Amino acid sequence: MRRAGTGLLLALAAGGCGKRGDPQPPYPRTPQAAAELHVAQRGNELEVSYVAPTLTTSGFALPMLEVEVLRAQGTGPLDKLAQRRWRDVQPGERVVERSPLPPPGGQSMRIDP
């Protein structure tokens, strides 16, 4: 009886082991590029619209996204000039961002999708 109990215990312990194989790296969570990117002037505002991605670059579904919006005027490094805003977006959601037009007189704007 004692041997049967020990054998059963070993069989249960061996059955609980994970699948053997080479370890796999975690899948990249980089979203695909935004789709349908449009920029338009609407009166005194600049309108940027896009559709948020639904998949990662490796084809996995995305959960709720946190999108960083950068807006900069003038020339120079974007990371130093940009005003940053964060926004929660559902995958596949159409997003519309509006902001005032830059002042006239040679100022330029750069949009990085």
Image (cartoon, grey):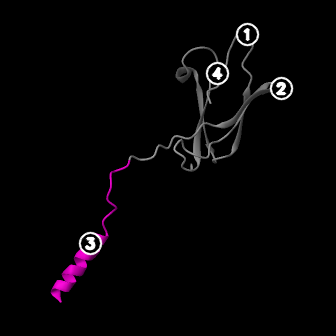
Of the two numbered discs 4 and 3 in the rendering, the one whose residue sits closer to the viewer: 3
Of the two numbered discs 4 and 2 in the rendering, the one whose residue sits closer to the viewer: 4
Dot 1 lies on which element? loop
| Cα–Cα span, label 4 and label 3 | 60 Å
Dot 3 lies on which element? helix
CB of mark 1 within 8 Å of CB of mark 2? no
Indicate the position of residue 13 as horizontal and vertical percent values. 26, 72
Indicate the position of residue 28 as horizontal and vertical percent values. 47, 43
Q: Which residue is mark 2?
A: 43
Q: Quadrant of the N terminus?
A: bottom left
Q: Earlier in the sequence, mark 4 or mark 1?
A: 1
| Cα–Cα span, label 4 and label 2 | 19 Å
Kind of residue at disc 1: Gly
Q: Residue at x 53, y 23 (%)?
A: 79
Q: Quadrant of residue 113?
A: top right
For the view shown, which residue lies furthest in the front direction?
21
Residue 110 is tagged as 4
Relative vertical location of residue 42 with respect to residue 15 in this rendering, above or below:
above
Kind of residue at disc 4: Arg
Q: Which residue is mark 1?
A: 105
Q: Which residue is mark 3?
A: 13
